[in-house]
Image: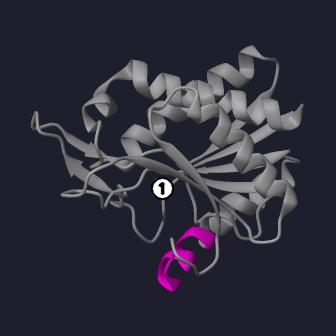
Amino acid sequence: MHVSLVIGHAGKPDRPSDRGAAYTHPSGVRLSEVSLVRRYADSIDVALLAAGHRCVTYEDGTYDERARRAKISGASCLLALHANAGLAGRSGQRGELFYWPGSAKGQALAEALSEALGRVVPYTVRVIPAEVGPYLSASRVAAVRSTIDGAVSPSVCVEPFFLDGEGADELVSDDYLTAIGKALAAGVIAWRG
C-alpha cells in the first residue's frame, strides 16, 4: 500500500510563514500546528514502513499541487494532517476526521482512523462529512475541502486533537504524539484490510 501524507500549513508558496493553529501552553511553551503535525506524521511514516507499506510526505506547494502529486504517484489514500484550536475556555477535547460527502471509501477510512484513535485517546473522535451542518460553517467547509479536493480517493482531513483543549499538557509529550501517529497508521492498515 502507498499512503500520501500532507503536512497542513507547511510550505505554502503564498504564505511561507503560515504555521497553522497556535496555542501557548500553560508551561509557556508555544505549540504550533505544523511542528506537532510533523511529530505525529513521523510516527505514521515509521509505523507504515515497519508494516511493509510505502509512505510519502508532502509539505511544499499548494494543497492542489500536493493532491495532484499524490494522485500521480498512485497513492492508495491521502491523509491531510492538521491539528485544531478553538476550545480555549470550554471544557473537553475532541478529534475530527473529515471526508468528502458521498465518498463511501472516505467514510470507511475516516471510521477506521477514528476507531484506531479511540484506542489511544480518552476523548471522542468525530467522523464528519465535509459539508455545511451542525459541526461546519460554510467557510470551514471550504477550508476543509481545500485540503482533500481533487486528491486521491479516499482522502481524509485529519484533526486528531485541539491544541487548546483539555489535556493539552500531553501535546508536548513525544510519547503522546507517537501514539497518535501509530494509531493513525493502524487505522489505515485496518481500512486496507
> What residue is rendered at 26% in x and 43% in y?
31
Q: Amino acid at mark 1?
A: Gly
In-front residue for pair 157/14: 157
Q: Work out whether residue 154 can be spotted.
A: no
Q: Residue extending furthest top?
A: 50
Q: Is residue 143 magenta?
A: yes
Residue 158 x %, y %: 58, 50
Q: Residue at coordinates 33% horizontally, 33% vertically from top-left? A: 171
Q: Residue at x 61, y 72 (%)?
A: 146
Residue denoted by label 1: 11
Image coordinates for residue 186, horizontal then vertical, percent? 70, 27
Q: Quadrant of the N terminus?
A: top right
| Residue 89 placement: quadrant | bottom left
In the rendered image, the vertical position of residue 162 relative to residue 61, given as above or below = above
Tell me where the magenta segment starts and ends, as one range: 136-145
Q: Residue at x 45, y 40 (%)?
A: 123
* 16 horizontally vs 68: left or right: left
In this rendering, would 73 be left or right of 86?
Answer: right
Q: Quadrant of the C terminus?
A: top right
